[in-house]
Amino acid sequence: MDHDTFRTWYGFFEWLVMPFRLLNTLAAFQRFVNEVFAGLLDVCVIVYLNDILIYSNSLEEHRQHVKEVLRRLRKFKLYAQVDKCEFHATFVEYLGYILSPEGLTMAESKVKAILDWPEPQKVQDIQSFLGFANFYRRFIHNYSEIVLPLTRLTRKGVPWNFDQRCQDSFNALKKAFTSAPILHHWEPNRQITVKTDASDYAIAGTLSITSRCEVRGNTVQNAKKS
């Protein structure tokens, strides 16, 4: 932390811990935790800044993974708040998602935020709404087509006119959030199905997996672009 040294009447001082207001703090901390968990990343650990997710194929294996993560935290003098930790959980909320053995869903608090979103009154309101919704677009089939009237309204030079088409688009997206499917975990040994669709203003696709005894596939990913 030598570069953050500052001078006072009482002498020079420097940080003993990393402050979270410097421009490159987050990038530096992410690089540090990546080094801490080297060899575990994408094997049994996912880490985003101070959010650590440990995953395993069995309970016994999971216990060993948890012990190794805790050992490394102790080695590098990092601390975890016990009241913010969940151990041996089957369902867990992580970075706005709910992870379970079945797959990935949106956190209920995020869905509620969309449902409670007030009607836009200006372009900035639409930009904020779409910025939030875009994070979960992988769950929404034909997302680009649904939001097209709203995205058109954000283009430069387009006068503000929140007409019935925009209102219908706004309401349709809210409704889509309440019926969004579970995105199932990828299983390479199962049959893969890719469905595509296109129009004059949008393209979309869905990746799903099925087994011989299933008629309907389980969605893994939705993709779209307008």
Image: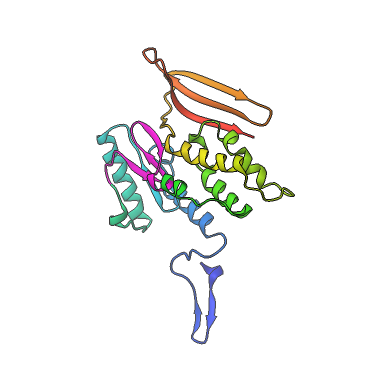
Q: Nearer the viewer, residue 138 or 158?
A: 158
Q: Nearer the viewer, residue 34 or 113?
A: 113
Question: Farthest residue in the top direction?
Answer: 212
Q: Position of residue 78 (x, y in %)?
A: 37, 57
Q: How many marks?
A: 0
**Per the image, is 78 magenta?**
no
Q: Position of residue 18 (x, y in %)?
A: 46, 64
Q: Tell me the residue at 50%/19% (across/down).
A: 193
Q: Position of residue 132 (x, y in %)?
A: 52, 48
Colouring of the image: rainbow
Question: Farthest residue in the right direction?
Answer: 157
Instruction: Choose top left, top right, bottom left or bottom right for residue 184.
Output: top left
Name the quadrant of the C terminus.
Answer: top right
Instruction: Choose top left, top right, bottom left or bottom right for residue 164.
Output: top right
Q: From what the image shows, is residue 195 above or below residue 174?
A: above
Q: Nearer the viewer, residue 164 or 171?
A: 164
Q: Nearer the viewer, residue 192 or 148?
A: 148
Q: Position of residue 24 (x, y in %)?
A: 56, 59
Question: Farthest residue in the left direction?
Answer: 60
Residue 151 horizontal side relative to residue 185, left or right: right
Question: Farthest residue in the bottom direction?
Answer: 9
**Per the image, is 92 magenta?**
yes
Residue 34 horizontal side relative to residue 124, left or right: left
* Magenta region: 87-110
